[in-house]
């Protein structure tokens, strides 16, 4: 492409971009590429708190259920501490799945 053609193409592209930006401004359309830090912080806290709560509750149920399974069923069924912990984890995950879908 020679210099005159390239210059004409660049000029036309600039004109089209300017028209597009003017049309967006007329229609009051604004695109924010990056949200403000305060909004990102709010979004992080809003999404992090439930996960921390779920993690605490999940581990609490797992420990309590594993201990109860070991105490009550461990001697009767001759299961190991690790097997009781695995059953407690299964129970905890089941409760987490059931209660996690309650808001929908």
Image: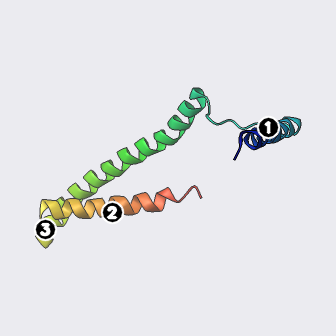
Badge number at residue 86: none
Badge number at residue 91: 2
Residue at the (11%, 66%) spot, across then down:
75
**Residue 21 in which image quadrant:** top right
Whether pointer 3 and pointer 1 mark residues with C-beta atoms closer than 8 Å, the reply is no
- Quarter of the picture containing the C terminus is bottom right
Q: Which residue occupies the extreme bottom position in the image?
A: 77
Badge number at residue 11: 1
43 over 65 or under it: above or below: above
Residue at the (15%, 60%) spot, across then down:
82
Where's residue 5, x and y in %?
Answer: 76, 44
Where's residue 67, x and y in %?
Answer: 21, 55
The answer for how far apart the CA atoms under marks 2 and 1 are is 67 Å
Badge number at residue 79: 3
Task: Tell whether 29 sits left or right of 96.
Answer: right
The label nearer to you, 3 versus 1, is 1
The answer for how far apart the CA atoms under marks 3 and 2 are is 16 Å
């Amino acid at each position: 492409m020679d210099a005159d053609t390239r210059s004409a193409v660049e000029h036309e592209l600039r004109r089209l971009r300017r028209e597009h930006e003017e049309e967006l401004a007329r229609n009051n359309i604004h695109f924010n590429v990056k949200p403000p830090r305060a909004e990102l912080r709010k979004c992080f806290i809003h999404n992090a708190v439930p996960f921390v709560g779920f993690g605490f509750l999940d581990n609490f149920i797992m420990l309590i259920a594993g201990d109860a399974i070991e105490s009550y069923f461990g001697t009767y069924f001759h299961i190991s501490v690790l097997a009781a912990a695995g059953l407690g984890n299964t129970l905890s995950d089941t409760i987490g799945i059931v209660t996690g879908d309650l808001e929908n």
